[in-house]
Image: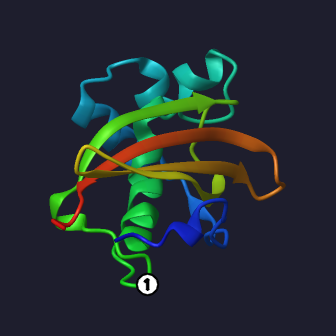
Amino acid sequence: MPDASYVGRQLPPTEPYQVGREKIREFATAIGEDSPVCHDLDAARAAGHSDLVAPPTFSVSFTMPQIEAFLRDPDFGWDYSRMVHGDQSITLHRPIHGGDELVTTIHVDDLRTRAGSHMLTLRCEVVDTTGEPVLTTKALLVTQAEAA
């Protein structure tokens, strides 16, 4: 059984993640995003951006490893082997740009058990190194509850 005492907690902030231009290009190519602002620095600057612009879903590349590490912590007690995503949302406060240094803080917002499943809601608040908000993600994760 996952430890319900985690609800309401926030985990320690991560070390800054440096967003690389090539990572943006690779991610954009992988998801089929062909916007010039994701691939061409001149096009991004001509559009008013400081550097390449990452697709909104790029954030999963640095938030999901942090979430996975938390869920695999035996102290929390989550069955990662049976987990599925129930829902996910991303709210951008500003675009992610090449060169950004981003810090993620995971918040454990909710944990419920219904119909034989544990349902966990995690929120990631991502800020730059000056503390300015960049994005917020929310994920509903589901795993099978143990048989009684």
Q: Which residue is mark 1?
A: 75
Among the 4 quarters of the image, the one containing residue 94:
top right
Nearer to the camera, 48 or 110: 110
Give the residue displayed 24% in from the left and 66% down from the top.
Answer: 80
Report the label total. 1
Disc 1 on helix, strand or loop?
Answer: loop
Label 1 crowding class (10 Å Cα cut-off): few <14, some 14-19, many 20+?
Answer: few
**Relative to 103, residue 34 above or below:** above
As drawn, 8 above or below 94: below
* Circle 1: residue type: Asp
Position of the N terminus, as image quadrant, is: bottom left
> Coloring scheme of the render?
rainbow
State the residue at coordinates (61%, 40%).
136
Q: Quadrant of the C terminus?
A: bottom left
Residue 24 x %, y %: 42, 42
The one nearer the camera, 112 or 98, is 112
Whether residue 76 sits left or right of residue 98 in the image: it is left
| Quarter-of-image position of residue 49 | top right
Residue occupying image coordinates x 43% and y 19%:
36
Which residue occupies the foreground of this view, 86 or 131?
Answer: 86
Residue 8 pos. (x, y %): 66, 59
